[in-house]
Amino acid sequence: MANNKPNGYLLAENSMYVVIATMKTDNPKTGDMVQVWILPKDVSPLDAVRTGQDDIVCFDCKHRGNNGKNRTCYVKVFQAPSAIWKAYKRGKYPKLAIEDYKYTFNGRKIRFGAYGEPVLIPMHIFRELAIYSDGWTGYTHQWANPEYLPYQAYIMASVDSVAEYEHAKSLGWRTFRVRTADGALMSREIVCPASDEANHRTTCADCRLCSGSYASDPRKDIAIVVHGSAASKFIQIGA
């Protein structure tokens, strides 16, 4: 019998953006994780980057570049984000009621923010996904904004310099820091176990260290050497 389950679901939408969960991935670093995407509603991700409208889902992230120029984000928007947005526009992702999350996401690992800012996922949805999942990962560049402090329990502060690392730590975040190959680790950091430099000892699905923080959290912060096609453009601001 054919499997008629959809390959993704619409979790939330408003006049600006949509939140979509896709159920399968071939990403070898993350492993078998549900991927949650935050995409502009009415402009394709590629056009959004070209026109600067990617701020709808990426805010003021320094890795956006300027209308697609000098972009240091590792996500290739012309690939998965564009394909998922087009599928959404074709009506391929049914809206999933929150009471059905327990059937759909039970026991799955979840990656919050495969593209887009996970702080745009409404908190009541975020909590429900976490409750029924078997672990998750996520990162935000909006860690300095007190409005998003509740997300600290679930996701990591994404930082790009020692100065940002120290600032985020002072606010109580665990961090995920991108560094250059010759940049030293901080005393509370370890190398990302799923990274090239760690010889891919595990996957994000199996590791799940990048899952926010709790009171007196003993877990280390994570660091990774800049990677991807834009690595040559990476500049550490305030290092």
Image (cartoon, rainbow, N blue to C red):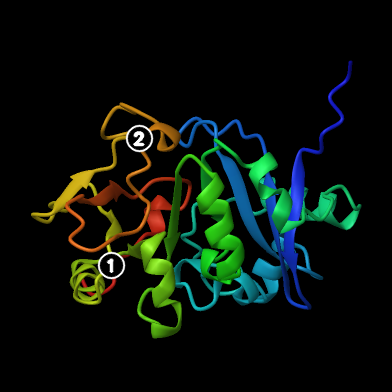
Q: For the residue labelled by badge 1, is the local secondary structure a helix, a strand or a loop? A: loop
Near mark 2 (Cα within 10 A), the count class, few <14, some 14-19 or many ≥20, is: many
Q: CA distance from mark 1 to mark 2?
A: 21 Å
Kindly tell me whether residue 221 is visible in this rendering: yes
Q: Which residue is mark 1?
A: 173
Kindly identify the residue that appears in the image at 65 percent across and 34 percent down: 24
Residue type at the position of mark 1: Trp
Camera-side residue of 66 and 41: 41
Q: Which residue is mark 2?
A: 194
Left or right? Give the position of 188 relative to 117: left
Residue found at the very far top of the displayed protein: 1
Rendered-image quadrant of the C terminus: bottom left
Residue found at the very far bottom of the displayed protein: 146
Instruction: Name the spot of residue 104 as percent of width and height, x first.
Output: 69, 41
Kindly tell me whether residue 112 is visible in this rendering: no
Q: Quadrant of residue 19?
A: bottom right
Left or right? Give the position of 234 relative to 94: left
Left or right? Give the position of 72 relative to 193: right
Instruction: Name the spot of residue 170 as percent of width and height, x first.
Output: 19, 76
Q: Quadrant of residue 179?
A: bottom left
Label annotation for residue 143: none
Q: For the residue labelled by badge 2, is the local secondary structure a helix, a strand or a loop? A: loop
Above or below, comparing residue 43 to residue 79 in the picture: below
Kindly identify the residue that appears in the image at 39 percent across and 84 percent down: 146
